[in-house]
Image (cartoon, rainbow, N blue to C red):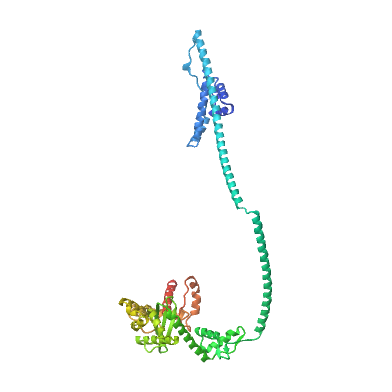
Amino acid sequence: MAALEENIHVSNSDVLEFTKVNGNLKCVQWLKEKNNHVENKPVEMAYHRSLEKLLSEKKILQKSISRANGKQNFENFLSNSFLMPKAKLCLRVSKISSTKSVTIHDDLKQKSLLLNKAELEVSNLNEKLNESIDKLDSSENKLSKCKLNLKRTKAREQYSSSKVKILESQMVPRETEISCCQEKDNIIFELKKSLKEKDKTICELKINCDYLEGVVQDIDKAQRTLTVFDVKSRKYTTILKQCIYELLQHNVSAAKVNPVIKSVLSLVNVQPNALPAKSTILDMNLQRLCLSQKHLAEVFSAEKNTTLLTDETSKFGNKFMGFEASDSKGNLWVLGLRDIETKSAEDTLKVLKEILQDLNEISDSVDNSVSKDILKHISATLSDRAATEVKFNNLLESYRAEILPLVYANFDQFSDQEKRSVENLCNFFCGLHSLVNFAVAAQSSITEVEKGIFNGPGPIFDKSFLKECEPGTCRLVRTASKAFASGSGADEKSGCQGPFREYIKDFLKEKKNYMHYPLNHIGVLDSISCLKMHLQFIF
């Protein structure tokens, strides 16, 4: 019996495969043949129900195959044995000897067969209905795709038709196109004609250039003479005067002006017919001064909101006072440089009046209008912090207060506040002098610090380097500058500037280059700051 059960073993996968190939009816017959050894045989409807149950379980497991353990459950389901239907013994009736009972049993059996057959036909019809529904769904999908393609095709057709209409509206009539072509042909013809004329002109110009080059070469071979002196009027030309003015402006001495002019003219093989003597050049220098004063009287006197700059210096035992001015545009004007007896405020104002009087005389002004206009337009002063400069500013304000009523026609009608606003000047003082003089106080402080450190004067190896009231720190900076620094302020007769410059060259390429400045207050301060910056990288 066990061997028989092994022979009739059927898995779920075998049943599903047979159903897929042969259909449900043949699969039921096949299962009945496999289960023929059973005494109590189930009805055919039981096989159909078992098969439908198997198919429904398959669909459920296929839907959940993507879930956790879904694939494993589906594989176990396929490998399990198919559960054959069993007969329901409770429905069976014991045999009755009467003929009526047998007839009823046969009728029930026949009706059961008819019912099973009807159920089988219903299941087949359901399968066909499902297939028809699937075909209908696919047909509906195809129909929707066709409608979408039709809609897109219609949209493309509408776009193409609208584009064609636009292009048709933009098309130029053939007559207009022909006329445009004719106009272009005429323009091309005219351009070609003008091009030929220009080519002809170019050829003529080339011939003229060749001729002129030959003339120039002939002239270059012979030494030319430049006329800078008119023999009849016995005057030098304006071009020569302008040249001499520019040379004097570039600090060329009067004795060296003629050699410079000859050297420059020799570059083009030209020789002047005459050159002025040194005394004449000095006279031209005076003419240059007169021209500058004339320019001040005509142009600067009209400038408004000007600032007066004053400073005093000594040279070869003489004192000089310089007067400059700046306008609202930032341009600087030199009013004059004069000898001064003393640096007193009265002498400074006296020199300023002399300069203004010279401007009046050279301008031929009436009632000294040039000097009055200049004083009227001064609104500020700039000078150092000397006491004489402060007093000079007060004297200048008083002098302007005397002049302003002569300049303003209605000055008497001004209020006191308006008069003060016109008379008062803005006085500015340079703060650099205080900063430089701070070095004296710093030097004495460093000396006291060194005395506290060394319990007396600082040690020194060579006393020839010692200067009175100079601390060792300042002496070290001064000695190092003379030994290593190059340019203004260094000792060029001794030291090792050349080797030190080669040693420091690579370092200066990486860091900011050390710049040399003229030996003035600003240059000294900037040089010290640069030196401090380099020392912190070296040491």
Say which residue appears at 53% left-offset and 24% top-offset. 123
The residue lying toward the viewer, choosing from 365 and 468, is: 365
Say left or right for 424 vs 29: left
In the rendering, at what x and y percent does residue 155 appear?
57, 44
Up-down: is 19 above or below 194? above
In the rendering, at what x and y percent does residue 230 appear?
57, 89
Say which residue appears at 53% left-offset and 30% top-offset. 78
Say which residue appears at 46% left-offset and 84% top-offset. 294
Q: Quadrant of the C terminus?
A: bottom left
Report whether residue 539 is seen.
Answer: no
In the rendering, at what x and y percent does residue 312 appear?
39, 84
Say left or right for 440 vs 501: left
The residue lying toward the viewer, choosing from 314 and 450, is: 314
Report whether residue 57 is seen.
Answer: yes
Q: Given the current orientation, which residue lies at the most extreme top position?
A: 98
Say left or right for 211 vs 133: right
The residue lying toward the viewer, choosing from 137 and 406, is: 406
The quadrant where residue 420 appears = bottom left
Q: How many labels does the image show?
A: 0
In the rendering, at what x and y percent does residue 38 appear?
53, 19
